[in-house]
Image (spheres, rainbow, N blue to C red):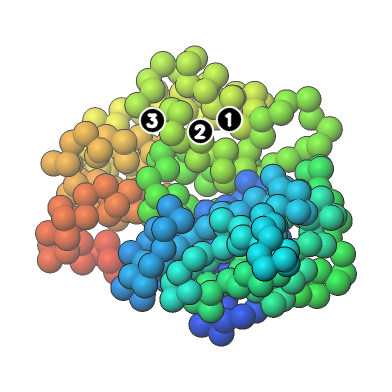
Amino acid sequence: MEKVTHKQLVEHLLHAYKIGSISVFLHGLHGTGKSQAIKAVAQTLAKEMKLEFTENGKENEKTFGFRDVRLAQMESVDLRGTPKVEDGKTKWFAPDWIPENTESHGIMFFDEFDKATPSVQNASLQIMLDRKIGNAHIPDGWMVITAGNMSDENAHSFEISSVLNNRFKHFELIVPTPKLWTEWAIQNGINSHIVAFLNFKPQYIYKYDENTKDVAHPTPRTWQFCSQSIEGVTDTAFMEREVASCVGKGVAIEFSSWYKMQEKVDLDAIVKNPELVTKVKEISLKYAVVSGLSEKYKSDRKILEPLLEVVKLIEPEFGFILLGYLRSTDKMAFGKIVTSKIWKEVASKYGKYLD
């Protein structure tokens, strides 16, 4: 099966939409952002086509729809709709998940497809190849995408037949690398402490052990939960419990121990004298410094220039995290500084990180 990154997946799905008619099956480990990526593609297509993105099921010629259909919640008889008698013959009301407007555009997304029972999967054969069920047709402007977990996960899935598999293009979404995940995380407002910690401990971006007794474990999805849960939290004991509830106790203890390392550094002193950052030698502490400074900038935008000095002085693997947060936190303020001397020095060092 062809393995792709999130960026490559978006490229292939955009291409698939332009081709039309061929259904796509996206495989991947749980919690790696399959559903999120497909919805993002729908939003991108809406923007490119200058249509309004909608997921309320009321599409028209001026909208681009996104419908999330869970076949695992259906019986095989639900797919075709409701029968009626007309002129002595049995006919069918189309199911409500098929768009009524034949001129509309969108993505029909069958998520958790592997959870559907074999009878439902078999009933969907016509949908995946011919884009219809009975006499009800999916409009030409819609693309069909399905998604499911990997077969070797403990996901209580049903095996998909070779006949059904042969009706799709198949891609496997891989776990993102630390660099790719960091770029996404900064753009999407993930807590800077989490981003810095996972650059220090990248093995925890995704870690699943089916033999563990802890039901919570780290995935890109649960780190996003974690980010929402600890935003604005300063009580370290409370924070550790919140982290544990999302990614597990063991990882939470490591995160908490790392987080407390900020107490070893005077961040205010570094803001006043950026040269002090060169005296920080421990790798773990450097990550703690850039995350701490990122958080300080959220509450004090006047420290932008000294923080750019820090970016200039510190090694790129740490500086690009701080630089990313400086750009995303206040794009307007950041844009005003691009003509300054310090920015020219930063840009020459971080050119490959700036696009």
Figure disc tally: 3
| CB within 8 Å, label 2 to label 1 | yes
Q: Position of residue 226 (x, y in %)?
A: 50, 33
* Left or right position of 287 against 277: right
Dot 3 corresponds to which residue? 231
Q: Nearer the viewer, residue 59 or 4?
A: 59
Residue lying at 66% horizontally and 65% vertically, measured from the top left: 86
Q: Estimate the spatial distance between the alpha carbons at disc 3 and disc 1, rounded to whole Å.
A: 14 Å
Q: Nearer the viewer, residue 347 or 59?
A: 59
Residue farthest front in this picture: 87
Q: Position of residue 29 (x, y in %)?
A: 70, 52
Q: Nearer the viewer, residue 59 or 243?
A: 59
Disc 1 crowd rating (10 Å Cα; few below 14, some 14-19, many 20+) is many
Q: Which amino acid type is shown beneath numbered disc 1? A: Cys
Residue lying at 78% horizontally and 43% vertically, measured from the top left: 155
- Residue 190: tell me if it is visible: yes
* Left or right position of 267 against 334: right
- Residue 149: tell me if it is visible: no
Dot 2 corresponds to which residue? 226
Q: Which amino acid type is shown beneath numbered disc 3? A: Glu
In which quadrant of the rendered image does the N terminus lie? bottom right
Q: In the structure shown, which secondary structural element does the residue marked by tag 3 occupy? A: loop
Residue lying at 78% horizontally and 62% vertically, measured from the top left: 123
Asked if 238 appears above or below 113 in the picture, the reply is: above
Of the image marks 2 and 1, the number of the one nearer the N terminus: 2
Asked if 335 appears above or below 294 in the picture, the reply is: below
Of the image marks 3 and 1, the number of the one nearer the N terminus: 3
Q: In the structure shown, which secondary structural element does the residue marked by tag 2 occupy? A: helix
